[in-house]
Each structure stands twice: as structure tokens, then as C-alpha cells.
Amino acid sequence: MPLGLVSGDPAIAACAAGAGLALAGGAFAFTRVRVTGADAPGDGVLSVADLLRWATQAARDGDDEPGELVARMSRPRPDFAGLVLSGTGARPRIMGVCNVTPDSFSDGGDHAATEQAVEFAQRLFEAGADIIDVGGESTRPGADPVAVEVELERVLPVIEELAAQGVPVSVDTRRAPVMRAAIDAGVALINDVSGLSDDPDARAIVAASVVPVVLMHMQGTPETMQDDPTYADVVDDVYDALALRVAACLDAGIAPERIAIDPGFGFGKTLAHNLELLSALAQFHGLGCPTVVGLSRKSFIGALTGEEDPRQRVAGSVAAALKALDQGAQIARVHDVAETRQAFEVWRAAL
Ligand code: HH2
């Protein structure tokens, strides 16, 4: 777990002095780490110099993993879905949510018809979204799955129209036939809340394309996920589960630079789980992938603030997204694009 995050001149100075390492090649550097597990030296909290010494010694002893973990944690992220995430031109990226559904938890029915959805997506793009995430199935807690044909009827005309207009689009789906049709229609990204695990054909379809993918973590299924989510340690368990999903995708032939991860806020998580994940988000850079977060309007914001109407959770959503940026998250999936873009610009200027 990276600790002691600094940005700006202190980050540059720490890296130059060997006292800090870049976090995911971004604007932050970490100056200490907490190492857990049986092999952890001392009390587990190490300076960067001690971390590098420990990794070098482990490599001499035949264990390359500590050194590889440090490299994954620190190295710049390549462009993802056409978005620059590290170096010159990098900035926090916004994925605007366009649900073509009658029943999504926060915007269900608002733009369920093709024409409405396309217009809405265009507005999000003009408001500063880098990519539009088009979904045709609600995955809110308790939601019933929809038939593939229905999902296709909802999302495909919207994707085709947006792609024809040159708007970068991702498709939010768990279904291989929807992925295949969306890839043919020109999506720039597949976003799967099951981490390419629900549909046995999904990994092969993504592998056969050049399209990148977001692997989100979910415990259980939308029907049952909030019944009694349980973890030994939510941060380590979600991290390990995502590491398995990344490994499965690499095995299927999906190149590492085509994979991003998302801890899946609200998907089989209690309020305490969501808060723990948000405050330990920097740990997820150890997976070596861009980090995506979907915090927008979620019920944990309602639980914290008493705001029952998801549409009124804009300020809480922006606050949560900024907390994620403070730990190097690269992409935020949000409903309120204009408000988020404004907050991100101020945040970036102040770094
Ligand atoms: N959350 C939702 C849907 N897709 N994808 C990623 N990568 N991360 C998320 O947190 C995430 C997601 C749920 O939000 P929404 O689409 O607004 O609601 P619904 O599932 O009810 O359509």
C-alpha cells in the first residue's frame, strides 16, 4: 500500500532524491509503503529506499514479485481507449453515463428512447466527457437480468449513431453477443461489471478484437449482491479477485495495455466496505492497470448524507471522485459531467 503521497514540486524532489517513486506514472509520488504478508520486513512500513533494497534482496533470493509489484505500482500507464493517462497531455478522464434503460437506479427512463439517448450523450460529450458509457441493462441491487435481444435493441442504435458522429463510446455489458455487436459498431471500450466472467465467450471476443476493457469487481450478482456482502479484508480481497480477473484476461490473449480495473463501488459492498476501498484506492495501482471508479450518485452517498434522491447526490459524488483522484485514479464514471469536469479542472490547477 503506497503511503505518504505528495504532488507537484515535493513529488519531483522526492523522486530526484530517490526518496519517492511515481504513482502509476502520474502527478503523485509515494514516499513510503506498507507491506503486508508473512514476508513483510519489520513493522511493514518502509521508506522507498528500504523498499527497493528489500525488492533487490528478494530478487537475489529468487523472488521477483516484490520488484515487479513496485514496477507495476510506479510505471506510466499507456494510452487507454485513446485517452492519454500519463505524461504530457494526461488529465483525469471522465466517462459519462448514458443508460438506455427504463429502470436504472438514478436515471432510469430519463433517456430510454434512442433519439433521447443520443441527444443526452451528445450533451455529456459537449460538457466534457472523454467517453460515453452506453448501458442497456440496469445492474442496480435487486435488478433482474434483461434478454440479450432487448439489451441489443436498446444500445446498438445509440452506439451506431454516436460512433458515426465520432463520439468515443464504451458499452456497459456483461454479454458476449452485445460486446461483439458493439465492437462491430465501433465502440472504443468494453465495460463489464462482471470483469469478463459472466459470459464464457466474453474473453475470446474481446481478445479477438483490439478494443480495451474495464474489469470491474462485483461480489455475487446484481439480484443478490447486497444481501450480506462479506470479506475477510475488503481491500485485499477485492485486489486479489481483480488480480485473478486480470490474469484470466492475459491468459485469454488480451494484451496488458488493454486492461483497466475498477473496484466496483456498491457492487456487493456495505457502506463500510465502500469507504475502506475509497480510502485505500492507491493500493490498486499495484495491479499495473489504469484505475476506473464509479462512485457517482451511489447509495453509500445517500447513506452518509441522508439524501434519498440519487439525482441530488452531485456534491457527494464529486467529493468522492476527488478523493479517488487524490490517490491517482485515472478515470471516473459519472452522471453529472459538467459539475465533475469543473471540479477536476480546479483540482488539477491546484496540484
Ligand atoms: N456502476 C454501474 C454500472 N456500471 N461500471 C463500472 N466500471 N463501474 C461502476 O461503478 C459501474 C459500472 C451502476 O450505475 P448506473 O449505470 O448508473 O446504474 P444501473 O446499473 O442501475 O443502470
Image (tube, grey):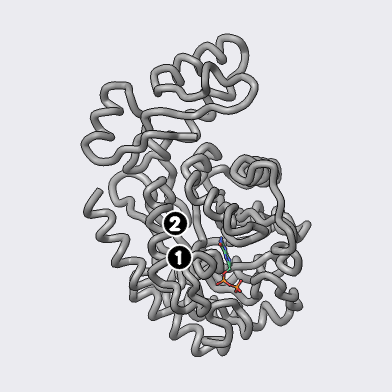
Q: Quadrant of ligand 1?
A: bottom right
Which residue corresponds to the image point at 47% horizontal and 68% vertical from the top-left?
A: 305
Depth check: 121 or 50 in front? 50
Quick check: 268 left or right of 110? right
Give the mark nearest the N terminus, 2 or 1: 1
Q: Is residue 222 left or right of residue 170?
A: right
| 115 displayed left or right of 200 | left
Q: Label 2: how many residues lie within 10 Å, few (<14), some (14-19) or many (20+)?
A: many
Q: Identify the residue at horizontal 72%, vertical 72% (top origin).
A: 142
Identity, as a three-letter code, of the amino acid under mark 1? Met
Is residue 218 placed above or below 111 in the rendered structure? above
Which residue lies under the disc numbered 2? 331
Q: Answer yes or no: disc 1 within 8 Å of ligand 1.
A: yes
Percent x, y of residue 8: 24, 40
Q: Residue sitting at 27 percent across and 54 percent down? A: 348
User: Where is residue 2 shown, x and y percent of the image?
Assistant: 45, 34
Kindly report the distance in space between the C-alpha atoms of the residues bearing marks 2 and 1.
7 Å
Q: Mark 2 and 1 residues: CB-CB less than 8 Å, in contact?
A: yes
Which residue is at a point 50% across and 64% down the rendered structure image? 304
Residue 227 percent location from the top left of the image: 74, 63
Give the amino acid type for the residue marked by disc 2 in the picture: Ile
In the figure, 162 relative to 55: above or below?
Answer: below
Element at badge 2? strand
Residue farthest along the right direction in this orientation: 200
Task: Kindly indicate the quadrant of the structure image that contains residue 226.
Answer: bottom right
- On the image, the x and y values in percent for residue 313 come to 45, 73
Front-most of residues 59 and 38: 38
Mark 1 lies on a secondary structure that is strand
Badge number at residue 95:
1
Task: Note whether 49 is above or below 254 in the view shown.
Answer: above
